[in-house]
Image (tube, rainbow, N blue to C red):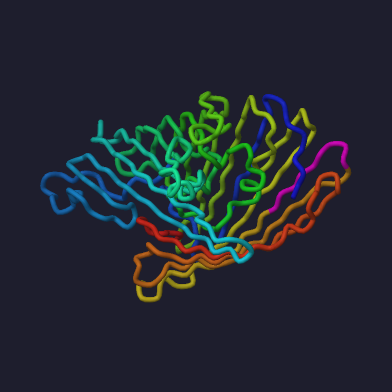
Amino acid sequence: MIRSAPAPHRRSRYLWPLVVAAAVVGSLGWPALAQDSLGPPAPTTTEPPPAQDQASAPKQGFSFNPDAGVVYQSGDFRVTAWGFAERAIDFSGPDYFRRVRQGAEIDLPRLSDSVRPAIVYEVDLTNTNFFGDFGGRGGNLGRRNFENMFVALQDPDDPGKFRLLIGENTHILSRDDNLSSGNLPTINRSLILEEHGSVNSFGTQFGVQFQKALSDKLTIQLGAQDNRGSLNAADARYEIGNSLSGKVILVPLNAEGRKLTIGAAVDHTRDFRDREAEGIYSRFSASHSDVGGGYAMAQVSLFDAPGSGDLDLFVRYDVVSLGIDGIDGRATQQALRTGINYNLPHTNKLASLHVEYAHNTLHGPAAIVTDRNPGDEFRIVLRASLQRYARH
């Protein structure tokens, strides 16, 4: 492991000059840009049709949409509920539930042709040992289980085009957790987020977020959140604006099964102690330390058919570099991950198998590096969901 740098003082600044650029051969594993929205996706229904086009009207009552979940529609009022469970098989330790989540979006009748109010929540039943406590103490469902809980004004049919929300949601710097629920392409997040993610930028935060698609290729996001953990944190924080962030997402190529995504973002977080860095590059003036890193990932679809299933092969490279003034040399942590995502045949992509191998390396001066043998990883994850596992 890398030894943490001395704790920064107030008003440490975290800069993200370049978040990620990912080009692939074949089919990329990210969902469409519209799903990279602030929070879980709205169901994929269409605008209410004119009176003469009753055949295309949203289905009333209860129905199942494999791209969204269980849907209840009454006029222009809609409730969409989703859920998924992932069971990890770990050959070097005990098996465990990686994630078990349930959520819903309540879409209230539209205020105009371009906006409607919505309420969104999602609970995680693994992070607080819900299943471990259930038998002995009747469960442990409380505020710390909530991954999302917010109210929003948004585009009536696609929040990726426009959404303004207030409440608890993942930070806008986090691309992974802002994918549609449970569609993370790998078992683990990137090193810069997971191993050095103590700023909570990939986690849930309280505040205000804004997203607007300026075109099919360009989306902007703005956030004024707390960024120290709130609602589901042990020490809840609710100071809107403690973290000010902006992000631009550019998709210059999205055709013929190939997609290139480039993101650039900046975040300024204040009043924050005893944490290490998170971001593509961060500099701590008080502790005279800095950390930078990133990742690139390619994913190709080998085949996709109802009778044979949907098999994707992926490769991802992660790197993190940590330096402290006064110490010669820098610590470098790397991971090379490869594996497959396989949506099982005849399951409509609602059941899948994920196999992943990671080779880890760690080098650097002894004053920083405390464990030079991080070890390799091998995991198998079984997944069942009310939403299709869509990667291309």
Judge by depth and name the residue closer to the eye, 360 or 185: 360
Q: Main secondary structure of the magenta part?
A: strand
The magenta segment: 319-327
Residue that lies at the very extreme toward the left in this rendered image: 52
Q: Position of residue 89 (x, y in %)?
A: 54, 64
- The question of residue 322 being in magenta is answered with yes
Name the residue: 69% across, 63% down.
Answer: 376
Up-down: is 68 above or below 76? below
| Residue at image point 47% right, 64% down | 382
Is 151 left, or right, of 27 in this rendering? left
Examine the structure image and report whether residue 206 is included in the region drawn in magenta: no
**Quadrant where the image shows the C terminus:** bottom left
Using the rendered view, name the quadrant where residue 73 is placed.
top left
Residue 314 visible at all: no
Q: Taking 82 as reference, is 15 above or below it?
A: above
Residue 161 x/y as whole percent: 39, 41
Residue 218, given in percent of the width and then of the height, sits at 48, 43
Q: Residue at x 36, y 56 (%)?
A: 387
From the viewer's side, name the closer residue of 138 and 82.
138
**Percent from the top left, x then y, of residue 85?**
43, 56
Nearer the observer, 172 or 205:
205
Q: Quadrant of residue 273?
A: top right
